[in-house]
Each structure stands twice: as C-alpha cells, then as structure tokens.
Amino acid sequence: MVARGIARLLLSNDGEAALELTVEPWAETQKIPPKQTWAVVTHSPEADGSWSGTLRGDEPFQVGHRPESVTVWVNGDCFHLSDMDGNFVDSADRHCPVRGYDS
Ligand SMILES: [Zn+2]
C-alpha cells in the first residue's frame, strides 16, 4: 500500500449543551454531546501526503467557530468522524484513498 498523508483533529465540547459540528465541503452536520471529544481524520489525496489547503497551501484542516457551532473544512478526499471510544459517528469515505480504512 502506498503511504499516504493522514491528519487528525480532536474537537472537544467543553460546554453544557450540544455543539453543532459541520464538516465541509460535504456539509455533514452532527451534534457533539456535552463533555465529549470527537476526532476528525482525513487522508491526503496526494501521493506525497501534501494538502491542498484552504487559505494557504499544505493545511489539512481549517476550523471556523461561531457561538453555538463549529465548522471544520477538510482538505482531504474523505473524512472519518469518531468518538474517543473509536466508534464511527459519520464519514464520507467514497473517495477515501486508503481503502478499507474503516471497514
Ligand atoms: Zn479516508
């Protein structure tokens, strides 16, 4: 298997209410329960493990925050969202370059 870039981002909801999470560009929306931390994982579409970036090159993620929600822009070909126990919450793996990653 060709080595690919992988990036992980942990998101903690330290508040008392659920936090709305939107994963772009798929516009997938989930709610992180209070006191939970979720992980967003993505794989680079490039063979050399680089990232396309959002505001600048070679950035796997960009996070935008509003009072009651957070938006994560993912600059990979896929995303895999899971809780700290490793249970998958959501994913968009149709174009995942790492086949069988979460199967
Ligand atoms: Zn993937």
Image (tube, rainbow, N blue to C red):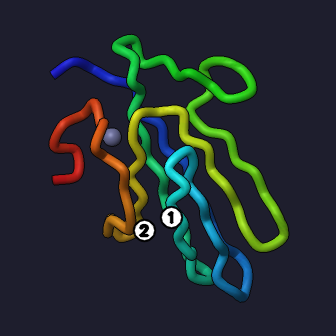
Determine which residue is flagged by label 1.
38
Q: Is mark 2 within 8 Å of ligand 1?
A: no
User: Is the residue 42 above or below the residue 18 in the image?
Assistant: above
Q: Is mark 1 within 8 Å of ligand 1?
A: no
- Tags 1 and 2 touching, CB below 8 Å: yes
Who's the residue at 72% across and 21% down the image?
56
Quadrant of residue 23 in the image? bottom right
Q: Residue 89 in the image: state x and y as whole percent.
A: 38, 68
User: Is the residue 48 above or below the residue 76 in the image?
Assistant: above
Number of the label disc, if any, that sits on residue 83: 2
User: Is the residue 39 above or below the residue 73 in the image?
Assistant: below
Q: Residue 99 in the image: state x and y as whole percent.
A: 18, 37
Quadrant of residue 88 in the image? bottom left
Q: Is residue 92 left or right of residue 7?
A: left
The amino acid marked with disc number 1 is: Trp
The single residue placed furthest to the top in the displayed view is 48
Who's the residue at 48% across and 52% down the image?
40
Q: Say what secondary structure mark 2 lies in.
A: strand
Q: Say what secondary structure mark 1 lies in.
A: strand
Q: Residue 68 in the image: state x and y as whole percent.
A: 77, 73
The N terminus, quarter of image: top left
Q: Is residue 66 left or right of residue 53?
A: right
Who's the residue at 67% across and 40% down the image?
62
The amino acid marked with disc number 2 is: Asp
